[in-house]
Amino acid sequence: MQKINVIMMVDDDIMTAFINKRILKIIGYTGRTVVFHNAHDALLYLQNASSKKEDLPDLIFTDINMPKMNGWQFLDEFSKMHTINKQISVMMLTNSVNQEDTIRSSQYGMVDHILNKPLTEFELKKLLKMHASDEKLIAS
């Protein structure tokens, strides 16, 4: 059983990020949550944290549609971080899940699932439980 110490949220929508962080508290998550409103800052954090393993997130929730650098571009850059990308699971967030996004996400080994926004308490509980038991949510 794997403990989830740090969750990273990457979403340009400040309200959505706030709500998701709030839901984590409501369901009893007691670890640390780091929130970034753009993918570039999230990547900088990951680069800096890679030398301090305790600061690395166990789980990343990232929006697909963001300005400047979208979720796919974030994954492309994150994929290049070979020393850490296999240790961290990624959940993609979107306003509308379509087949094309599902197929595209399967090309990234670290992506476990694509989820509709906003997240619900039920979904988050289920995801955290599955992650803690180290189950994959979709085939990669």
Image (cartoon, rainbow, N blue to C red):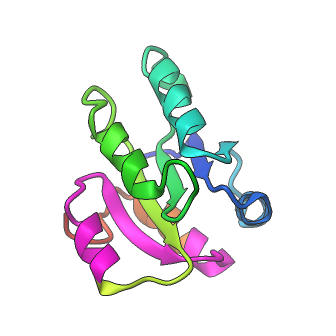
How many marks are shown on the rendered structure? 0
Percent x, y of residue 19: 77, 66
Say if 89 sits above or below 139 in the image. above
The one of 9 and 3 positioned closer to us in this rendering = 9
Classify residue 1 as left or right of residue 118.
left
Q: Residue at x 43, y 21 (%)?
A: 50
The one of 44 and 20 positioned closer to us in this rendering = 44
Which residue is at the far front?
68
Say if 16 sits above or below 80 in the image. below
121 part of magenta stretch? yes
The one of 42 and 130 positioned closer to us in this rendering = 42
Q: Quadrant of residue 104?
A: bottom left
Q: Residue at x 53, y 56 (%)?
A: 61
Residue 118 seen by the camera: yes
Classify residue 14 as left or right of residue 124.
right
Percent x, y of residue 23: 74, 66
Q: Residue at x 45, y 56 (%)?
A: 71
105 part of magenta stretch? yes
Q: Residue at x 20, y 69 (%)?
A: 139
Residue 87 seen by the camera: no
Percent x, y of residue 78: 36, 39
Percent x, y of residue 113: 38, 69
User: Where the C terminus falls, by quadrant?
Assistant: bottom left
Q: Quadrant of residue 101?
A: bottom left
Say if 65 sits above or below 99 in the image. above
Q: What segment carries the magenta color?
A: 100-124
Classify residue 101 as left or right of residue 122.
left
